[in-house]
């Protein structure tokens, strides 16, 4: 069944890439048509699944028990698990949300929830692939954690800053909120959740935590549905690594702040 499913994903990815190449190749970064954003996002989701499958991450995830009987009887595990969910909820559904601007984009909860669920499920498998890669060296757990943290931070910093926040998600930040979200949302999330994964190896719960975080992000940035006709504000960019564009955050007239 897994092979059949992944064959379908590979075919879908090839089809989406062909459509993008034929219709939208060379589109200016500032042209933020919702259907193009969805197309780019769906290609990314397919790539995440293909990488996870090719690396063996998907099989390891499917074989990983959701929770063990010993964990259910462990007070430390219960506290760690509950604490991780509370932290992610506060970090993204309260703190991240409070610093997010939407420019009056309309809320469409069914679409935004579905987008967030798929975003989280696919991205978390890339995180797990990186974590499994860090285990091939036979290092002590603390060494694996440090390497995993460094690689995940690099992936999130480079990929999110220079592609996802530039070509997929509409503008939802300011220069200040970009920095504050790293400090109060992204760093606590990755620090606590990666430690939890290292200590207990609850891969399904790790996926749930990251999916909860990104579902909140999709809802509170009000990611537009693909049929949206209202203009979507493209992210403001600035030259970054190697001169490539990176997300720089909205700078506007303070007398006319963007609508939240």
Image (cartoon, rainbow, N blue to C red):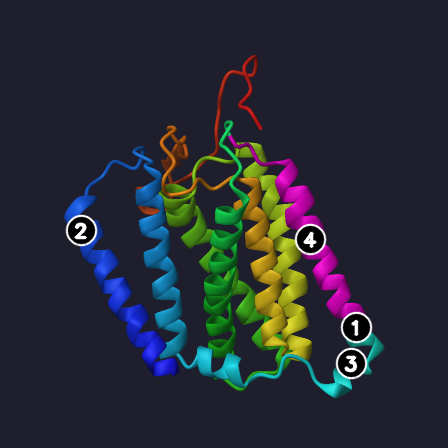
Counting other residues with Cα less than 10 Å from the Cα at mark 1, is it few (<14), some (14-19), or many (20 or more)?
few
Instruction: State which region is magenta.
Output: 79-102
Q: Earlier in the sequence, mark 3 or mark 1?
A: 3
Name the magenta segment's main secondary structure.
helix
Magenta segment includes 68? no
In this figure, which residue is indicated by the disc labeled 3?
Answer: 72
Magenta segment includes 83? yes
| CA distance separating discs 2 and 4 | 38 Å
Counting other residues with Cα less than 10 Å from the Cα at mark 2, is it few (<14), some (14-19), or many (20 or more)?
few
In this figure, which residue is indicated by the disc labeled 1?
Answer: 78
Q: Is residue 196 visible?
A: yes
Q: Secondary structure at mark 1?
A: helix
Q: Are marks 3 and 1 in contact (CB under 8 Å)?
A: yes
Q: Give the residue at x 59% y 75%.
A: 203
Q: What label does residue 89 carry, if any?
A: 4
In this figure, which residue is indicated by the disc labeled 2?
Answer: 21
């Amino acid at each position: 069944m897994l092979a059949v499913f992944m064959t379908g994903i590979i075919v879908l990815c090839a089809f989406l890439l062909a459509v993008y190449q034929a219709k939208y190749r060379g589109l200016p970064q500032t042209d933020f048509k919702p259907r193009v954003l969805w197309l780019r996002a769906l290609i990314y989701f397919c790539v995440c699944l293909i990488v996870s499958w090719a690396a063996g991450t998907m099989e390891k995830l499917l074989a990983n028990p959701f929770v063990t009987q010993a964990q259910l009887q462990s007070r430390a595990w219960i506290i760690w698990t509950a604490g991780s969910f509370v932290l992610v909820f506060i970090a993204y559904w309260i703190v991240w949300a409070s610093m997010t601007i939407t420019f009056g984009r309309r809320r469409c909860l069914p679409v935004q929830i579905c987008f967030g669920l798929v975003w989280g499920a696919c991205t978390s498998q890339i995180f797990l692939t990186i974590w499994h890669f860090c285990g091939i060296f036979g290092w002590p757990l603390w060494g694996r954690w440090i390497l995993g943290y460094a690689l995940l931070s690099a992936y999130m910093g480079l990929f999110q800053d220079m592609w996802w926040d530039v070509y997929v998600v509409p503008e939802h930040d300011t220069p200040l909120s970009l920095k504050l979200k790293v400090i109060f949302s992204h760093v606590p999330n990755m620090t606590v959740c990666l430690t939890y994964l290292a200590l207990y190896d609850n891969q399904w719960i790790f996926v749930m935590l990251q999916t909860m975080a990104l579902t909140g992000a999709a809802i509170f940035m009000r990611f537009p549905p693909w049929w949206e006709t209202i203009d979507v504000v493209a992210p403001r960019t600035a030259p970054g690594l190697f001169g490539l564009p990176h997300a720089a955050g909205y700078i506007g007239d303070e007398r006319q702040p963007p609508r939240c």
